[in-house]
Structure formats: C-alpha cells, structure tokens
Image: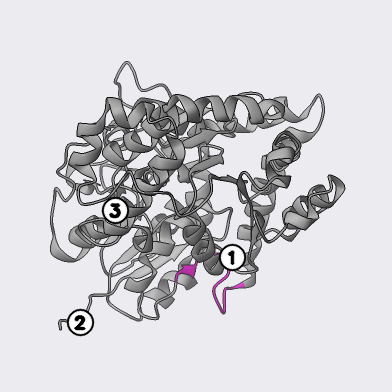
Amino acid sequence: MEEEKKAWIVSVDMGYGHQRAAYPLRHLSPNGKVINANNYPGIPEKDKKIWVNTRKFYEFISRFTHIPLIGKPVFGLYDKLQAIPKFYPRRDLSKPILQVTQIYRLIRRGWGKDFINYLNQENIPLITTFFTVAFFAEEHGFKNEIYCVLCDADISRAWVALDPSKSRIKYLAPCRRVVERLKLYGVKEENIFLTGFPLPEENLGGKELKILKSDLAERLINLDPEKMYRQKYSDTVTRFIKDIKIEARHRHPFTLTFAVGGAGAQRDLAHSILLSLKKKILAEEINFNLVAGTRNDVYLYFKEQIYRHGMQKNLGKNLNIIFEVHKEDYFRSFNQVLRKTDILWTKPSELSFYCGLGIPIVMAPPLGSQEFFNKTWLKMVGAGISQNIPSDTHEWLFDWVNSGWLAEAAMSGFLDGRQFGVANIKDVVFNGIKEPAKSFQLL
C-alpha cells in the first residue's frame, strides 16, 4: 500500500470555523494533528501577544450585539470595515483593504517568521484555513506550495494577498461564487481551485456515500411523516438513494440540534426554544441537542436553563448538552451527533456547508457580512430556511415537518452540496488536478 503523502495542516484557534475546516484534513499532517499558528509550542511572546489581542477583540465584538442600545451599532461599524462588497456589477476589486495592509505591516516586522521557520524543517506543502498564515508563508519564504482553504460562501478582500497578481498562494474554494469573487480580487485563475468545503469523512462513507445515504434515508422518514415529499418526488429519492429502504421504520426519534458559534453568541436563543418545546421534551416526543462546543460558560448556561424549567430528568436521555474541553474532541462528538440529527438550527456560519450531509438548516440571524452571504447561498441551494419566532417553535417547526418542506431542504442540500472536499483537496495538492470538482452542482 502506497504511503499517503503529507502536508502541514494549519489553522488558528479563533472561533470554530477555521478549525472545523481543518479537522477533516488532520490525517494529512505529519503527526496527524492540526497545528494552530496562534498557540503552537515555542511561539515567541511578541507573536502570541498579537494573536491574543486579535482573538479577544473578535470574541468581544461577537458578543457585543447583546449590549442594549449600543451593541448592534458598534458591531455594525466593525462589520462594515471588513464587509464583502456587492458582487455586481463585476469590477476590479484588487485594491487591498485596510485590514490587509495592517496585517502585512506586522508581518514585515517579523510576525509569523518563527512559525514559517518551523514549518520549513520539512519540505512538504502547506494547507491552511486562515489567510494570515498563507501571508506568513509567502512573505517569510516558505519553500513549498501554499494552499488556503476558504470557509464561507463568499469572502472579503482580507483573504487575498497585498498584491494578488504576484502572489503564489493557491486557493481551495468551497463554491462557484468564491471562485468568481477571487477573480474580482485579482487572484490569477491558475491559482483558484473549486474543491468544495472539507466535510467530515466519517459522515460520508466513502465514494459511494453509504453512511450519508443511510442517514439521509432515515432522516427523510422523520422529516416527512405524512409522506408529502416522498410521494411527490419518489423518483428523485429512489434514484439518488437507491438500495435504501426509505419506507422502513426510523431508528431514532425526531431530533433537533441547536448549535451556537465559537464566541458563544446567540446562546440566549436556547432559552426560548427550550420553553417552547418543553411539553414535547418532557413527553419524550422529541430529542433535543444543545451544542455548547468547548465553552464551559455556554454549557453551564444551558444546564441552568434546563434545571430552571424543570427538565433535568430528561437530561442525558432525550435532552443532551454537547460539550468537550478540547476542540478536536468536540468536532468528533458533534459529527457523531449529526448522524442522528434531523434538523440543524444554527447561524449561517461554515456549518452552512454541512447541508451537503443532507441536513436541513434552520438559520438563526447571521452575525457578520460573510454570514449574510452564507444565508443567501443556503437559500439559493434550497437547504436553509430562516427561523421563525423562537417562542413559537412548537408550532411552526412541526408545520414545516408535516408539510414535507424540511425533507425537501434535506434533499436539496444533498443534491447541490459538495461532499468530496477532502478528496478534491488531496487531488489538487498531491496529484496536480486542476478541475477536481466536475459535477452537476449549480452553486
């Protein structure tokens, strides 16, 4: 058996998005682990200080929206500084924004040089899920190829080098809109590859997608109890999920999973959802997962709400809090939970691409310019639906289920999402394939 080729897999410990994108690629790394550029062993104190300040500011701004009166205007001002410009009319958007010039100023003073010196100990490619690391590599003389995985359905100018016409950074795009956006930013066409987002391979089941199709078949039963969707689109279902008995009885109760972002924003939504679903939870008519990620404060908040509203007897049964101390353990647990999740309720973050697993997304309000674009992308794919009033979840959510609407969203995500991001990235990096993602996907 031929030994698998290796590449440095590098992310940053800020929120979940960049590390979630890196997690499915971790096996490509020499030690099987993702390296975080902002907290690797031996990081110089001056470099660490820059990263710490950046992370604190990011998390502060993300939570700032909760502050009455001034929260939303202040967040809006910050978001405007890094906003993604309108796509049309097509025009030259290659001029660097302030954020990029500031990053390069710090890099040219030595930020990131120690890290690239460390990576240069082995002559293997770099795959990073954060643009600053790609800038480090180019400016400080990384001696192999530089690849940057993009984590949203549209991106700001911050992801592209100071002078894109001279840059050797190669971009791994999750969807067609990002490919076209990179061209507007001045990235050379030969440095752009449409691969799809790297989804967890443990949720796929190989080239035949056996695990995904099996999970989706069961999900469709839960999402379409009246057979509204399956009767109307039976040919589509049987064509793409052949050899799966979609009329079989489901093996898990109807399951809703609610996930907050890495900064802990929107956790208050859980309070309204819990209250609305209380009767169904107590009667064990629904499984409800609350995803706290690695944030102990969010875990304690969820637990407090469960006890406050008298649902503690259901905790650990049909009411669960998903929490882990370490990010890698969290991603592993979360991916396992998704296999028996019928609906994922979350803001349109990088998790938008998880619609490719055949999971309909109920979208919480977006935070940040890129999430508004993710929301638009999800709606265009047909896999995402904006949440209704959280306190009325017990009514509208089940109306949507009984109508077959969410079953249709699940199939739309499966059909138009891209499942083979990891394989496509490997083909680009190690096999020199220019167009790895030839498919029928529209977006």
Q: Secondary structure at mark 2?
A: loop
Q: Amino acid at mark 3?
A: Gly
For disc 2, the neighbor class at 10 Å (few under 14, some 14 to 19, many from 20) is few
Q: CA separation, marks 1 and 3?
A: 32 Å
Q: Name above or below for residue 113 compared with residue 309.
A: below
Q: Amino acid at mark 2?
A: Glu
On the image, the x and y values in percent for residue 50 come to 62, 58
| Numbered range of the magenta stretch | 34-44
Q: Residue furthest top?
A: 89
Q: Name above or below for residue 211 compared with residue 62.
A: below
- Please give the residue where the numbered disc 3 appears in the rendered image: 421
Q: Amino acid at mark 1?
A: Asp
Callouts 1 and 2 close, C-beta under 8 Å: no
| Residue 382 colored in magenta in the image | no
- Please give the residue where the numbered disc 2 appears in the rendered image: 3
- Please give the residue where the numbered disc 1 appears in the rendered image: 47
